[in-house]
Amino acid sequence: MSLDENISSPPEGGAQTIAHHSSGPCPTAGNQVRNDWTREEIAALFELPFDELVFQAATVHRQHHTPGQVQLSTLLSIKTGGCPEDCGYCNQSAGAKSGLKAEKLLDVRTVLQTAAQAKDRGSSRFCMGAAWRNPKDRDMPAIIEMVQGVRQMGMETCMTLGMLTKEQSQMLADAGLDYYNHNIDTSPEHYEKVITTRTFDDRLETLENVRNSGINVCSGGIVGMGETRADRVGFVHALATLPRHPESVPVNALVPVKGTVLGDMLADTPLAKIDDIEFVRTIAVARITMPASMVRLSAGRESMSESTQALCFLAGANSIFTGDKLLTTGNAGDDADEAMFKKLGLVPMEAEPRENQLEAAE
Ligand code: SF4
């Protein structure tokens, strides 16, 4: 029996599966990318028996991506700390008492040297993050030089610089920026419990500016911030109903850092950590609802077992950050990843410049 036959003929007595089929079309029945997901449909996916959910996600994954290929990105903090925003999970907020020292914007040469090293280690995308509410006009020339320099090395470029105006988005697009990361973080309802200096709608506005300028969108969030299952449904729903899905969807597990609002609240509460199975469920639901997007395992990976990561890959995750550090928190490390890839038979994905991706989408 092929995967498709099995999916379109649900096993007899599968109550959850039947409930799902009765509430809308089977998400794996075709190759279509939908933007009209309802919260009820997404909640029903979360409720599926785990093996059924992962099976559906793996099937969707194979319809849209080459299984076994994982895109590798390296993330560099180009401007660390002292951020005026108050994101409760972040040790770079000026209000956090994590002891992190604020630094100035790195010089272009240092950034390009680090990018060259990342390329040598197999990364196809170089992501640069600055702890800003938004970039100032005086920062833009250096930022543009960084984008152009990294692109000339044949790597995809990604930036995360905070909120962008239409004009700044266009400047970055003209410089050849491939991706812009701006996470919605969580559900619209849970958002103000995590961040108060900027609204959910502010986030959507920047995403719209980025999208309209022709840059690929990278947007996801963090689970394990004290949100409910309904919030995780709302988080996926907000992304899966955007007029066009983000090309890249990072799903982070909170890394509680002492001195941050959420870190202090959750660090000594072991049960507060997102359950591994619930994390894999979130990955699987993101994969099913945004079938063509790259779903990225991001922060929190270093504390996940290889088995949990393997389940995430099976459930459709196909992108990771490599290197020892993620901006300012720990990451799994290149050697550990190389060993895991060998064990699981995974291979790194080649870089694909933005022109090719845009042509493919047309
Ligand atoms: S997540 Fe970004 S915007 Fe929020 S405090 Fe940290 S650096 Fe600033």
Image (cartoon, helix red, strand yellow):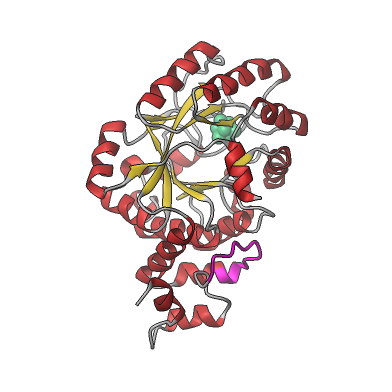
Q: Position of residue 235 (x, y in %)?
A: 57, 55
| Closest to the observer, 230 or 15 | 15
Q: Position of residue 292 (x, y in %)?
A: 54, 54
Establish if 8 lies above or below 234: below
Q: Is residue 147 visible?
A: yes
| Closest to the observer, 275 or 49 | 49
| Closest to the observer, 188 or 295 | 295
Tally of marks: 0
Span shown in magenta:
30-41
Residue drawn at 57 percent across, 79 percent down = 23
- Left or right for 72, reference 156: left
Residue drawn at 24 percent across, 43 percent down = 342
Establish if 167 lies above or below 104: below
Q: Main secondary structure of the magenta part?
A: loop
Q: Is residue 80 visible?
A: no
Q: Position of residue 356 (x, y in %)?
A: 58, 40
- Left or right for 216, reference 262: right
Quarter of image, res 85: top right
Can you name the residue that lies furthest to the bottom here? 12
Tell whether position 102 is magenta.
Answer: no
Residue drawn at 44 percent across, 33 percent down = 124
Residue drawn at 33 percent across, 40 percent down = 302
The quadrant the N terminus occupies is bottom left
Establish if 106 lies above or below 249: above
Quarter of image, res 158: top right
Q: Position of residue 317 (x, y in %)?
A: 42, 51
- Left or right for 131, reference 55: right
- Left or right for 27, reference 57: right
Quarter of the render that holds ligand 1: top right
